[in-house]
Amino acid sequence: VSSVEQVDALIAESGGEAVTLELTREGALQTVSVMPILDQNHMPRIGIWIRDRAQGLGTLTFVDPASGMFGAVGHGISDVDLETVLPVQDGLITEAKIRHLVKGEKGEPGEVEGSLTGIVSGRVTKNTDMGVYGTYQGDVSTMQSLPIALRDDITEGEAVIYSDILEDTVRAYTVQIEKTSGIPVFDTGLVVTITDERLLNATGGVIQGMSGCPLVKDGMLIGAVTHVF
């Protein structure tokens, strides 16, 4: 099934008889039988909650012009209630229009407020713990080409973060790489502090919506922003 409406229709066809569901739980396929109950309109219901779509605001990290593959966000798109990475059948990335920046404060991460324009830039094929991936359909001719740093190439010190949250075009802002090792979790291998006064005045540091912003040091791509401390 691919939509809530399709599930509703199939349950309605049961006429109140038991329905059999095939589902995946923790990677294992299971079959369960559920007896519907009639609601106030005498429609059979089985008391399940279904999410058939999700959306969010984040940053495109890179595009590989040779394969057309993109990576974005730097972490998985999770269900806000279950806090688990959502399985994705397919999806889209679109351009976004930023309306407002909520400055981060102590104990409050801040956020980018905006809306999706509907201008499609690519198709999503994977949603993983390490980010969202798929095929890019936009123009790559104006993008800057950079080599990728190996883990041992990354050192502490001044670097830059690329973002377009202050202007309609991507700009470089200074950051400080505070720590490069000793953190066992793969997706938090760097500790980064925003030092650029323009960005600090607007955001207070890293805010939600900046996830995926690429980090560049010594002319090499060293990683991407993923989480806010």
Image (cartoon, rainbow, N blue to C red):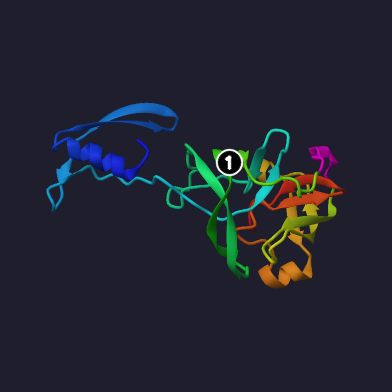
**Side (left or right) of 222 relative to 21:** right
Q: How many discs mark residues in the rendered view?
A: 1
Where is residue 142? Give x, y as percent: 76, 50
Q: Visible in this render: residue 58?
A: yes
Query: Which residue sits at x=22%, y=38%?
Result: 11
Q: Is residue 113 above or below residue 90?
A: below
Q: Secondary structure at mark 1?
A: loop
Q: Can residue 187 be found in the magenta stretch?
A: no
Where is residue 115? Give x, y as percent: 53, 61
Q: Is residue 57 above or below residue 219?
A: below
> Residue 3 is drawn in which quadrant?
top left
Query: Which residue sits at x=25%, y=45%?
Result: 47
Query: Which residue sits at x=55%, y=63%?
Result: 114
Q: Residue furthest bottom?
A: 201
**Side (left or right) of 163 relative to 124:** right
Give neighbour class at mark 1: few <14, some 14-19, many 20+ (Cα, 10 Å): some
Where is residue 141? Give x, y as percent: 75, 46
Q: Visible in this render: residue 108?
A: no
**Side (left or right) of 138 relative to 218:** left
Q: Which residue is mark 1?
A: 129
The quadrant in which the C terminus is found is: bottom right
Q: Which secondary structure dominates the residues rendered in magenta?
A: loop
Amino acid residing under circle 1: Asp
**Side (left or right) of 216 relative to 39:** right
Where is residue 223? Give x, y as percent: 73, 46
Q: Which residues are magenta?
A: 146-154
Considering depth in this image, is 139 or 188 the residue closer to the camera?
A: 139
